[in-house]
Amino acid sequence: MASWKTIRITKPCRLRIDNGNLLVEDDELRFKLSLEDTDSIVFEGDRFMISAKVLSALSHYKIATLFCDEYYLPSAILHPYHQSSLATKTLKAQLAVTPSYADKLWQRIIIAKIGQQREVLEILGKEAEKLKLYITQVREADKYGAEAKSAKYYWNRLFDQLVREPDSFDIRNQALNYAYALVRSLLTRDLSAAGFLPALGIWHDNKYNAFNLSDDLIEPFRPILDIGVYRILEFHPDEEVLTPQMKKELINLLDIVYIEYEKGSSSLRNVSRLYVQFFKRSVEQGDAELLSFPVFDIKKLDECL
């Protein structure tokens, strides 16, 4: 059975395993959730009690588990080891990635990202002409820094006076952080399931980051999430902090069918798995051209929101 539920834990509670199910309870309420039907869990804050047995069960059922801080940034992601029967083969291929492959893949990732940023701005009726130029400037390894130039141009036009700072309480930053964190956890889960080591990036190489590879692969997804966040914020013009309803709508971005990938329409949740499988094939064959990138369909997004 395919799992589909995303659970948010936001209030003080205790979590334990009861007859193979996840039991969430406080002094007044008690919920029993099927682990088999749960795809991801988001823990917000630190007012909950969770046992090693629960963490083990979440890992066993390959549930993407995300712990968020007060800025809605991921403070930890639970990802299991040895989920793939071919984990050693995949890990060897990951360790054998050549600089030439990494440089070429990063070039393709950045071209895909800037192309989607341009699409976002054009849909919103904002100036996007310069992004056409930046796309032509992307070389292997992005040696001329087209991504940085496009990012500055893009953010200055997407949101008025938005400063992308990790510890900002600007609701736009909070919503973006929350959406990015959700997809980062999905990619990390799917990379682990495919036998990859998420800490070992193709391009990102921060020794303090356990999810460098996830941060490589999420780049083309960011503009796709940006347009979803933009639309959701339009529905809540007077809110100054993320509300439960807004978080529900952000989580819903994972499940509505507005992504085109490999000649088919699907949800972000499903595309994440397929994308990682294509990445696996690309790494094992050492051919960066084998990885394709998702795009969004604005008509389908607007129909679903």
Image: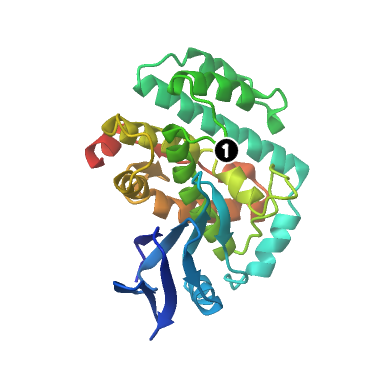
Q: Is residue 134 visible?
A: yes
Residue 29 location, x and y as percent? Answer: 29, 72
Residue 133 location, x and y as percent? Answer: 56, 15
Residue 303 vertical placement versus 190 (above, below): above
Work out which residue is located at the far front of the displayed protein and give it: 27
Q: Residue at x 58, y 62 (%)?
A: 192
Q: Residue at x 61, y 44 (%)?
A: 216
Label 1 residue SS: loop
Residue 161 location, x and y as percent? Answer: 48, 20
Q: Is residue 62 visible?
A: no
Residue 132 vertical placement versus 233 (above, below): above
Q: Quadrant of the C terminus?
A: top left
Q: Is 278 left, or right, of 17 in this rendering?
A: right
Which sits in the foreground, 260 or 253? 253
Quadrant position of residue 111: top right
Residue 217 vertical placement versus 173 (above, below): below
Q: Amino acid at mark 1?
A: Pro
Q: Residue at x 36, y 37 (%)?
A: 228
Q: Is 150 left, or right, of 9 in this rendering?
A: right
Residue 197 location, x and y as percent? Answer: 66, 59
- Per the image, the residue denoted by label 1 is 166
